[in-house]
Amino acid sequence: MTNSTQSGLHFTELLKSSSQLDKAGLEIGLVSMDDLIQELNIHPYAAAYAADLAEEPQKQLLERCNGNPAEYFVSALTQQLITAAKVAGDAPLRVRLSGADSHQRQSLFGSELENDEINPLIGLRGVSRYADKSVRKSFELECEVIKRARDAEGMTNIELVIPFVRTFSEAATIIDLLAEQGLCRGAHGLKVNLMAELPANALLAEKFLQYFDGLVIDIDQLAQFSLGLDQTHPSLEYLHDDQNEAILLLVRQALKAVSTTGKTCAVVSHYINNAPKLQRWLLDHNVETVITQ
């Protein structure tokens, strides 16, 4: 396995578990709310709409959460972000809001409250989920986590990263929805970044950046949606190629937009250790740090 010293790139970590916070010398590149929620093992809909559960699971949830699932959910995640923000110190702590597809959330307690989808990979997720009034309260709980964490001990280094923004209309929608929840972009230094994971995000990055303070480019997701892959399908693993020319073209377009607008940029790649061509390419394009796991 190639390490950061050998490749010339500097690697930071994707925070997926509270256990990582005990690691000496931890450098957090990105916090995944989806993974922290997986660790908590409570579906956001169950936390927000506990009364909609059947009698027995509702009873179990209330017993576990001291009678208040929403508060339990918010408090647990808030404490993890506060700890992570302290580890980050003066560096920005980028927190990606939940964007997992419904299939990825099926193992969570209370997942029966989320509708089954024929194609969850491109179903109700990201901004389309936040904007859905029937489940809006779950988004509001995540916003409350961010607000509490930023207010605690002056943790204003916490930034937002918004996943799965399909259109400019959705970009405008999420900025408005955040403002409604007291998370106004620019207020008290709050930065809101776009998770560039869809080809449209990369191709139209300069226009998307009119709504955001920076990009977090997820090369793996760009590969998945550009090449029509399913990363969870074992038989299709051989097709995954972050070094594909089409993927590099998309990343180049996104990096060019960042340079043109003078905004910030981070890059995510879980396969970077097995992609020497990609490592060299990123260095040639002035990318020095990659978030990985």
Image (spheres, helix red, strand yellow):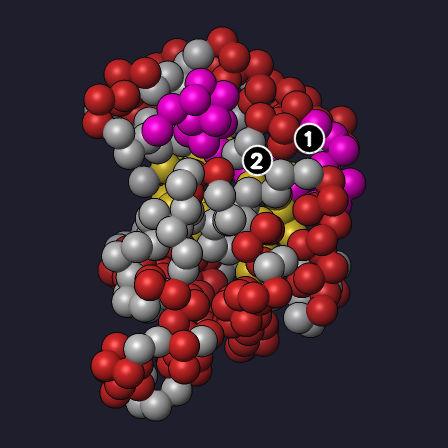
Local packing at callout 1 (Cα closer than 10 Å; few below 14, some 14-19, many 20+) is: many
Up the image or down, 4 lies above or below 80; here it is above
Q: Quadrant of the C terminus?
A: top left
The local secondary structure at tag 1 comes to helix
The three-letter amino acid code for the residue at tag 2 is: Ala
Q: Which residues are magenta?
A: 204-230
Q: Tell me the tag on residue 196.
A: 2
Residue 278 showing in the rendered view: no
x 35%, y 76%: residue: 53
> Circle 1 sits on which residue?
205
The three-letter amino acid code for the residue at tag 1 is: Ala
- The x and y percentages for residue 245 are 49, 9
Up the image or down, 291 lies above or below 253; here it is below
Q: Quadrant of the N terminus?
A: top left
- The x and y percentages for residue 69 are 38, 81
x 66%, y 23%: residue: 203
- The x and y percentages for residue 229 are 38, 24
The question of residue 216 being in magenta is answered with yes
Q: Tell me the tag on residue 74.
A: none
Dots 1 and 2: beta carbons under 8 Å?
yes
Q: Earlier in the sequence, mark 1 or mark 2?
A: 2
Q: CA distance from mark 1 to mark 2?
A: 8 Å
x 60%, y 59%: residue: 132
